[in-house]
Amino acid sequence: MELFTSTSGNKVDVTAVDKTIPQDVKNVETPKFTDSIFKNPFFSAGLGLAGLGVLANVGRRVLILSNAYFRRRFMTSLTLNNEDLAYPWVLNYINKQSTTKTRNLTVNSNVNQSESGKTTTEFYFLPGHGVHYFKHNKRWIQVDRQREKQVISNNNRRTPLETVTLTTIGTDVGFWRRFLAEATEEALSKVETGLVVYNAVGPDWRRFGPSRRKRPLESVILEDGLSKKIHDDLEEFIKSGSWYSDRGIPYRRGYLLHGPPGSGKSSFISALAGHFGYSICMLSLSERTLDDDRLNHLLNTPPPNSIILLEDVDAAFQSREDPMQNHRAYDGMTRVTFSGLLNAIDGVACAEERILFMTTNYIDRLDPALIRPGRVDVKEYLGYCTPKMVEQLFERFYGKQATTEEKAEFVKVVSRFSGEISPAQVQGFLLMFKNKPKDAIGHLNSLLENKNNIN
């Protein structure tokens, strides 16, 4: 017998009480709370979805970490932005290398105008923003071009920052060096086949249109021996960098070509630049936005292997001996001072390895301080046609098409006015009679009647 003392102090026989409970009641099992929860179909479904979510999240993180680990150990990337000089070269090279051309493109346009006034348009297609793929040297490369929210200053204009990231399998960094070398070589091959011209945009030199066809040096007809004289002087200067450095002499050379309009000053400089593989940086001193600081910056930051050309300097600065001049080009049209120009040419902050050409139609209007040695080392006069120059122009146009008698007659007639007719006038006249030497001789009167119309 099992006794149980109640709260009132009475003893109760538990065994006796148990006997009074029906057997079927005693056999009923009380359900557990956890069992009821897990057997609930809604809870089970929610728990399953939560489990799948956890597994998916874990799987995603594992995939991200695995991808990052794989990229870090087995892949290399190269990133460039549009502040880099090689940025357009790489994009253009990618577009040409791609065997399956992308349908997402951006375009750069150039409008070119020839000397005759004919206008043509060129379009350059580049991979657009987004992800592209192409194969190079048996390797697949992923290209990810993005436009950032950051804004940069480009040629005095605010433009969005753009980046392009190239990724490939392999850990050889030399692959990217070779890739960049090939892209650069292709871009520069176009430059080397033509003459590149820059003009000033804001504080920077900006390429002006596509490269121009190089003009042969012998195609510019000058007085006998003059072309060779200037050519040899410039060639000697280009080769003498170490000589200047060893003696502490500024490695700079200045040239002034003066003479009447149409005598070939600008044409000869262009031909000379093309001959030596140099580009030309053209700057007008009469530009309204040009001031001393900007001029100094431009003259001392030209692109490598370039010639700076200041044309018609007589229009900007005239002699200080003229009391009517205030040493400005046109009052209110330029902020460049004469002293600012002198300091930019040979001041303390002047750049080394610089070639400067200036042209003028009237050398007597220039201040002696501007053309003294050290600022201008070589001064040469390019004048009107001599009989020898007339003969060379005629031979260059017609060669064997004309007889010796026709050439002699043309030279004889034109030479009577050789001190009044420029090479540009003779060339312009002969262009009207291409491959027709007899017609040129027959119309000589029109050339002689208009000999004073010099452009």
Image: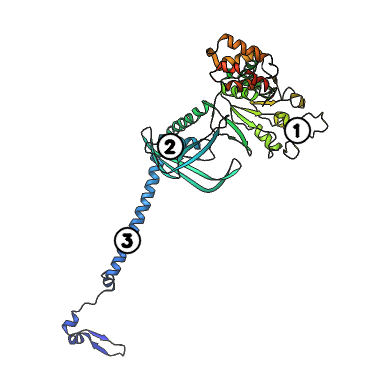
- Are circles 2 and 1 on residues that touch, CB within 8 Å? no
Asked if 57 appears above or below 13 in the picture, the reply is above
Of pointers 1 and 3, the one earlier in the residue sequence: 3
Q: Residue at x 30, y 68 (%)?
A: 43
Please tell me in which quadrant of the rendered image residue 452 appears. top right
Q: How crowded is mark 2: few (under 14 residues within 10 Å), some or many (20 or more)?
A: some
The mark closer to the camera, 1 or 3, is 1
Of pointers 2 and 1, the one earlier in the residue sequence: 2
Please tell me in which quadrant of the rendered image residue 255 appears. top right
Left or right: residue 114 compared with residue 254? left
Going by the picture, which residue comes out furthest to the left? 23
Q: Distance between the residues labelled 2 and 1?
A: 49 Å
Q: Distance between the residues labelled 1 and 3?
A: 81 Å
Mark 3 secondary-structure assignment: helix
Mark 1 secondary-structure assignment: helix
Q: Please, what is the three-letter code of the amino acid marked with disc 1?
A: Phe
Query: What mark, if any, has residue 95 been given in the picture?
Result: 2
Going by the picture, which residue comes out furthest to the right? 323
Circle 1 sits on which residue?
Answer: 338
Left or right: residue 11 compared with residue 370? left
Q: Nearer the viewer, residue 170 or 213?
A: 213
Asked if 84 appears above or below 62 in the picture, the reply is above
Circle 3 sits on which residue?
Answer: 51
